[in-house]
């Protein structure tokens, strides 16, 4: 499935990215590749030269995806949420920092576990420690 993202106007980053002046606010772009690091991910976009911080984009999806994440905070409706995305690679657990699009609804499931849905339609299951 093709990943499509929408530029949200972000410009700040701690790591080397290309000039965000090339991007158009609220324009959708197709992600050609993702360069995932421990604390950030960079996107390469079709038709745009360079790489760009994934936090500058909201994922546009026709269907929804479900993610398992960890956080020390409870998600809040109306705000973007910072958490750690749980990934398994080569039999090892890896946590990557994740910034969601704006949270639209939150449901408490019990035992410090919440389910929330974001503006992009993605569903997250978060355990709050």
Image (cartoon, rainbow, N blue to C red):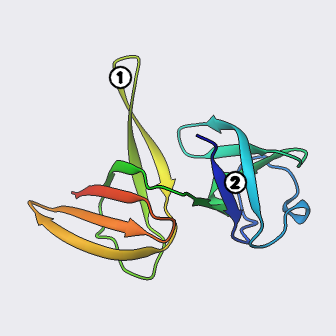
* Left or right: 129 as drawn, with respect to 36: left
Q: CA distance from mark 1 to mark 2?
A: 27 Å
* Left or right: 2 as drawn, with respect to 69: right
Identify the element where label 2 is drawn: loop
| Residue at 59% across, 60% down | 60
Quickly name the residue at label 1.
Answer: 92
| Residue at 41% across, 46% down | 85
Quickly name the residue at label 2.
Answer: 14
Q: Who comes first in sequence, dot 1 or dot 2?
A: 2
Name of the residue lying farthest toward the top: 90
Identify the element where label 1 is drawn: strand
Cβ atoms under marks 1 and 2 closer than 8 Å: no
Q: Which image quarter is the N terminus in?
A: top right
| Disc 1 packing (10 Å; few <14; some 14–19; many ≥20) | few
Q: How many marks?
A: 2
Residue 107 x %, y %: 22, 72
């Amino acid at each position: 499935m093709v990943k499509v993202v929408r530029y949200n106007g972000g410009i700040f980053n701690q790591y080397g990215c290309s000039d965000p002046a090339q991007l158009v606010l609220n324009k959708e772009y197709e992600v050609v590749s993702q360069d995932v690091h421990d604390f950030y991910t960079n996107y390469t976009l079709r038709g745009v030269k360079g790489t760009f911080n994934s936090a500058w984009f909201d994922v546009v999806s026709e269907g929804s995806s479900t993610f398992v994440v960890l956080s020390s905070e409870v998600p809040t409706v109306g705000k973007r949420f910072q958490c750690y995305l749980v990934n398994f690679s080569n039999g090892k657990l890896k946590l990557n920092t994740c910034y969601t699009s704006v949270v639209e609804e939150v449901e408490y499931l019990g035992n410090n576990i919440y389910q929330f849905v974001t503006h992009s339609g993605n569903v997250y299951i978060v355990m709050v420690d």
